[in-house]
Amino acid sequence: MRFAWIVVVAFVTMIATKAVAQAEDLFRTLRPDLIIGISRDPNGSGADLLEFRTIDPKYPPEQLRDQILELGKLMNSEPRGLVVARSSISSGMSTIKATCAIDNIIDRSQPRYHLKQIAQAFAGYAEPHAVKGLSIQFLNEKPRKETLLDFGGPNDAVQVQGSFDPTFSAVEYRIKINIQDAKQIEIPEAGEQKPIPAPSSDAKGGPDWMVWGLVFIAAIAVGALVYSLLTNTKVQKGRKR
């Protein structure tokens, strides 16, 4: 009888531990290695304007460039106006920043977001610059009933959680990359038909203030900077003709 109780207690503990792990709040626990701001081209083309910022100021610029080029390859759209450079964000603080335009990261036909290709593009690099966490903001976007809310767990290749902040009109995702083999990464483009909640103030507290500061900087800069690059590229192509 005593052995049976031990087995029952062990089983209940295992289930409880698994439930807690699956309920992990990535907005509270995950420290992103990169912050990505994505918005639609205001000119109405199929292009999406992207801005990338690294948290680690020592992140290799050439690695970031290669990852963005890989994202373009996965999307069948060569990045246009790609610029990668060091950027100062405050006195004594800097980040590696990149801007470009890539077609249809936001799928207009559904509309949905191509998270799988983003995660695959940034996976597969060795320490100390392996990307294990991403913060992705789709600016001026609102969730729909089929918008992906939650996917994966600690034993899966990736974990995904989404939220909607009506104050900044942005759908944000946190992606935790558990396996660096890009071929194993799968993320569905649609989710359960239920409301997508706004993140709690507790989930956004603590050391994440710097991350949010970078996100807001990206939100302000992505439209003007990348759209300017995209426009200049179009003008130059027109002149060549």
Image: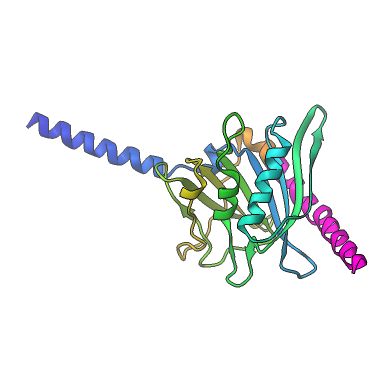
Please state the horizontal and vertical placement of residue 60, each as a whole percent of the image: 70, 34
Can residue 202 be seen in the rendering of this structure?
Answer: no
Q: In the displayed image of the protein, which residue is found farthest to the top?
A: 92
- The image position of residue 17, as x and y in percent, is 34, 37
Q: Please determine whether, in this image, residue 148 is positioned above or below residue 219.
A: below
Colour scheme of the rendered structure = rainbow
Q: Toward which corner of the image does residue 156 lie, by quadrant?
A: top left
Give 165 or 97, whichever is nearer the viewer. 97
Which residue does the image show at 81% across and 33% down from the upper left? 90
- Is 91 above or below relative to 29? above
As drawn, which residue projects farthest toward the right?
Answer: 239
Check residue 202 for magenta coloring.
no
- Front position in the image: 46 or 27: 46
Does residue 219 appear left or right of residue 30 in this picture? right
Describe residue 45's horizontal placement relative to residue 107 as left or right.
Answer: right
- Which segment did they paint magenta? 212-241
> Looking at the picture, how far across and down is residue 178, in whole percent?
48, 40
**Is residue 104 visible from the viewing direction of this image?**
yes
The residue lying at 84 percent from left, 56 percent from top is: 229
Q: Please give the name of the residue rendered at 51% of the width and 42% of the height, measured from the top-left corner.
A: 177
Quadrant of residue 19 within the rendered picture? top left
Magenta: main secondary structure equals helix
Total numbered circles: 0
Quadrant of the snapshot with the N terminus: top left
Q: Report the side of 157 relative to 34 (left or right).
A: left
Report which quarter residue 103 is drawn in: bottom right
| Image coordinates for residue 79, horizontal then vertical, percent | 73, 55
Question: Magenta segment: does it hold 215?
Answer: yes
